Image: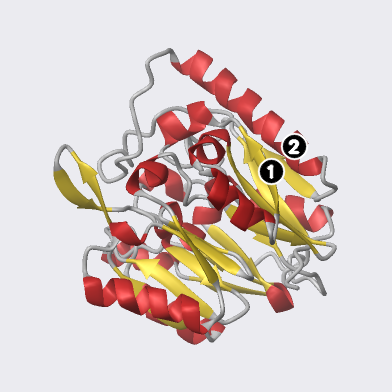
Amino acid sequence: MNNIHSILMVRPSSFRTNVQTIENNYFQNLSKIGDKETLKKAQDEFDHLVKKIESFDIPVNVFQDDLTYDTPDSLFPNNWISFHKNNKIALYPMFAKNRRLERNENILKFLESNNVKIKSIFDYTIAEKNKQYLEGTGSMVLDRINKKVYASISERTSEILIDEFCEDFNYMPIVFKSYQSHENVRKLIYHTNVMMCIAEKYSIICLDSIDCNIEKNKVFESLKDDGKEIIEISSRQLNSFAGNMIELVYNNHSYLVMSASAYKSLSKEQIIKINKYSKIIFSDVSTIEYCGGGSVRCMIAEIYPRGRSILTDPNIY
């Protein structure tokens, strides 16, 4: 099994609806309450989720964000960093200017202090100068076992950068477009990880969001070829963030982490299928979902086994 070492989560200090991302994230909404109350609710939801995950003995590295920069989406670290075996990390180009401030060297130093080692860094952030973006494991859903990248092209997901990532990390790209209905118009889904989740033995996916039948069949056949049980979700369930889940394998035990809204949207049959493979962990993050337009998967950056670090070199970042 593909065991993690631990996970990274960032506790927010300035969470609110990010007006720089709402233009193409149709899951986001303007808060109906004040910023202070929104932040307090988000922090409470964050803390409760951390406690839930830790109750299953999964190690969580919680970095407390500060007010050095205005980073309303800092609790979604998986968009700017990903961790890989052999102690490699990747840093990603972000669509929103204030999200670029989330790439914080102090987080890497914090991880170093928690025995997370980094051997090499693949930095794609220069692509921002060309207005090309690839927002980490939001843009890409990684099948780390079969070395495939599933990527739904959008304003935040560049096919050019997907190819570059695949070459660097030896993955095969499975590229398509997925859509959601917004004000009676089909709009590109901003991140792949809200419409699909890949676990070692199964996949949860909204195939109805892939309008092109050729692309839909390509994705379906790729998953079937790898022996995945395909658990389909509806567009209604997608809107409840049922695609935004993450499998965490720790000490050879599989856990599927999701929000309470995602869990409540699932049918009994879907839950039975998931329980064949994974223990379900769910927690309420409704404020984060409503204002941030992301859910539990977006809040977790999974970290893989460690080795010698290069963080003592001041020139790596």
Query: Could you tell me if the residues under marks 1 and 2 are in contact, i.e. CB atoms within 8 Å?
Result: yes
User: Is residue 159 shown to the viewer in this render?
Assistant: no
* Rendered residue at 21%/51% (across/down): 187
Residue at point 53% right, 35% down?
Answer: 264
| Residue 86 location (% of width, % of height) | 72, 78
Label 2: few (<14), some (14–19) or many (≥20) C-alpha neighbours in 10 Å: some
Going by the numbered disc 2, the residue's amino acid type is Lys
Question: Which residue is at a point 14% across and 45% down the rendered structure image?
Answer: 185
Of tags 1 and 2, the one toward the viewer is 1
Question: x%, y% of residue 158?
Answer: 32, 68
Q: Is residue 158 left or right of residue 111?
A: left
Per the image, label 2 sits on a secondary structure element best described as: helix
Please state if 268 lies on the left or on the right of 128 as rendered.
right
Instruction: Name which of mark 1 and mark 2 comes first in the sequence.
Output: 2
- Secondary structure at badge 1 equals strand
- Above or below 132: residue 233: above
Q: How many residues crowd mark 1 within 10 Å: few (<14), some (14–19), many (20+)?
A: many
- Relative to residue 233, is residue 285 depicted above or below? above
Task: Check disc 1 and report the residue beneath it.
Answer: 281
Spatial separation of the CA atoms under disc 1 and disc 2: 7 Å
Q: Quadrant of residue 146?
A: bottom right
Q: Is residue 228 left or right of residue 240?
A: right
Disc 1 marks a residue whose amino acid type is Ile
Judging depth in this view, the residue of 204 and 80 nearest the camera is 204
Splitting the image into 4 quarters, where does residue 299 fall?
Answer: top right
Label of residue 220 in the image: none
Q: Nearer the viewer, residue 184 or 32?
A: 184
> Is any atom of residue 143 visible in this view?
yes
User: Which residue is nearer to you in this view: 215 or 165?
Assistant: 215
Residue designated by label 2? 52
In the rendered image, the quadrant that contains the C terminus is bottom right
Judging depth in this view, the residue of 212 and 94 nearest the camera is: 212
